[in-house]
Image (cartoon, rainbow, N blue to C red):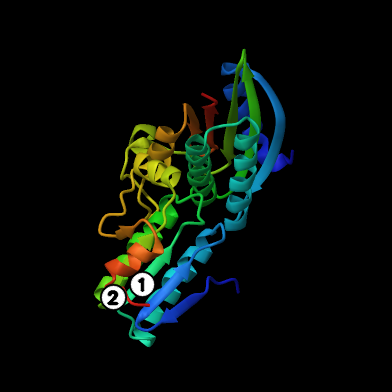
C-alpha cells in the first residue's frame, strides 16, 4: 500500500509530503503519525508541505486533526513551508488551521520545536 | 456518453444554454474514486497553466475542483466532470461542470452555507469553492442529481 515515509530524528518525527495526496493517503498518514508518536515516544512532529501545490479542506482537516491528536499524545506539531498561493486559497476557502503551529521553513520549524542544534 | 448519465445531459444542456460561450478543448473525466480526484486536479492545473492563469488563481481553481469532485463522489455517489477552455470575446477561462445522478440537494441555501454538512466534513465544500471561482451555478433536482458549473477567468 502507498505510504508517505516518516523519519525519526532524536525525539522528532519528520514528514515531507511530496506527492499529490488522495484522501485515503492523507488518512493513512494521519494514522501512521499518531501510531509512530506513541511507538517512538516522539515529542515533536514536523510536517513539511513546501512541495504541496494544493491544500483543500480534506488535507487541511487531516493536518488540524493530526496536530490535535499529537497534542493529546504529548507531542507538538509544526507545519512548515506552505506556499503563498496555498495560504491565500486556504483562508479564502474558510480554513485557518486553528491550533496548528506553522513556520516558514524547516529551520524555523525546528527552532519552534526547541531543536536548534543539529 | 453512457445511458447511466442521461440526467447529466439534461442538466448540462440547461447550464450550457444559459452560458453560450465558445468552448474548446473539452474533456470528460469520470469521478468515482480518490484517484480520480487527483487526476482531475492535474488536468485542471494543465488547463489553468495553458491559459496563463496566475499561480494564485490556478491554486484557487484546482482547490475548488478538488472540493466539488469530492462532493460528486461522496454525496452524489459518483459522476463525471467536463473541462472546457472558454472564450468570451478576448477573455479566456477554464470552465468545469460536475454532474452526478445522486439524491440531489434538498435545501441549496443551507448547503451553500459554511459549516453545514451531512457527511461529517467541515461543510466548506460548496460555499468555500464558490468563493474561489468567478462564476458558480448549481442545479439540483431531488431524486435526479446535481450539476455544478464553475468558471475562473484569466485576469
Q: Is residue B102 left or right of residue B46?
A: left
Q: Residue at the far top: name it.
A: B89
Query: Against A37, is B19 above or below?
Result: above
Query: Which residue has dot 2 on it?
Result: A75
Q: Is label 2 on the same chain as label 1? A: yes
Q: Residues within 10 Å of mark 1 (few under 14, many from 20)?
A: many
The residue that appears at 47% across and 78% down in the rendered structure is A7
Q: Which label belongs to residue A45?
A: 1
Examine the image and state in which quarter residue B14 appears.
Answer: top right
Residue B100 pos. (x, y %)? 57, 41
From the viewer's side, name the closer residue of B89 and B136.
B89
Disc 2 is placed on an element classified as: loop
Q: Where is residue A63 in the image (x, y as percent from the top left)?
A: 38, 61
Quadrant location, the N terminus of chain B: top right
Mark 2 vs mark 1: which is more N-terminal?
A: 1
Q: Where is residue A55 in the image (x, y as percent from the top left)?
A: 45, 51
Q: Which of B154 and B34 is in front in this view?
A: B154
Residue A31's image quarter? bottom left
Gap between marks 2 and 1 measured at Cα: 7 Å
Residue lying at the far front in this picture: please name it: A117
Is residue A50 depicted above or below B45 in this figure? below
Q: x, y percentage for residue B41? A: 58, 46
Amino acid at each position: 500500500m502507498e505510504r508517505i515515509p516518516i523519519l525519526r530524528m532524536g525525539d522528532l518525527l519528520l514528514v515531507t509530503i511530496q506527492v499529490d495526496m488522495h484522501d485515503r493517503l492523507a488518512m493513512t498518514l494521519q494514522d501512521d503519525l499518531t501510531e509512530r508518536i506513541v511507538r517512538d515516544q516522539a515529542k515533536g512532529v514536523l510536517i513539511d508541505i513546501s512541495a504541496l501545490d494544493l491544500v483543500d479542506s480534506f488535507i487541511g482537516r487531516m493536518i488540524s486533526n493530526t496536530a490535535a491528536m499529537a497534542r493529546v499524545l504529548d507531542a507538538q506539531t509544526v507545519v512548515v513551508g506552505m506556499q503563498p498561493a496555498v495560504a491565500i486559497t486556504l483562508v479564502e476557502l474558510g480554513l485557518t488551521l486553528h491550533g496548528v503551529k506553522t513556520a516558514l521553513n524547516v529551520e524555523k520549524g525546528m527552532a519552534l520545536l526547541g531543536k536548534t542544534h543539529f | 456518453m453512457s445511458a447511466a448519465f442521461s440526467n447529466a445531459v439534461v442538466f448540462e444542456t440547461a447550464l450550457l444554454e444559459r452560458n453560450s460561450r465558445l468552448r474548446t478543448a473539452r474533456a470528460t473525466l469520470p469521478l468515482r474514486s480518490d484517484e480520480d480526484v487527483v487526476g482531475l486536479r492535474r488536468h485542471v492545473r494543465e488547463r489553468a497553466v495553458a491559459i496563463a492563469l496566475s499561480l494564485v488563481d490556478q491554486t484557487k481553481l484546482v482547490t475548488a475542483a478538488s472540493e466539488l469532485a469530492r462532493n460528486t463522489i461522496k454525496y452524489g455517489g459518483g459522476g463525471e466532470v467536463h473541462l472546457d477552455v472558454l472564450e468570451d470575446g478576448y477573455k479566456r477561462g477554464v470552465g468545469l461542470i460536475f454532474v452526478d445522478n445522486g439524491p440531489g440537494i434538498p435545501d441549496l441555501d443551507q448547503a451553500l452555507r459554511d459549516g453545514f454538512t451531512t457527511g461529517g466534513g467541515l461543510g466548506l465544500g460548496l460555499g468555500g469553492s464558490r468563493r474561489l471561482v468567478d462564476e458558480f451555478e448549481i442545479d439540483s433536482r431531488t431524486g435526479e442529481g446535481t450539476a455544478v458549473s464553475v468558471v475562473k477567468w484569466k485576469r
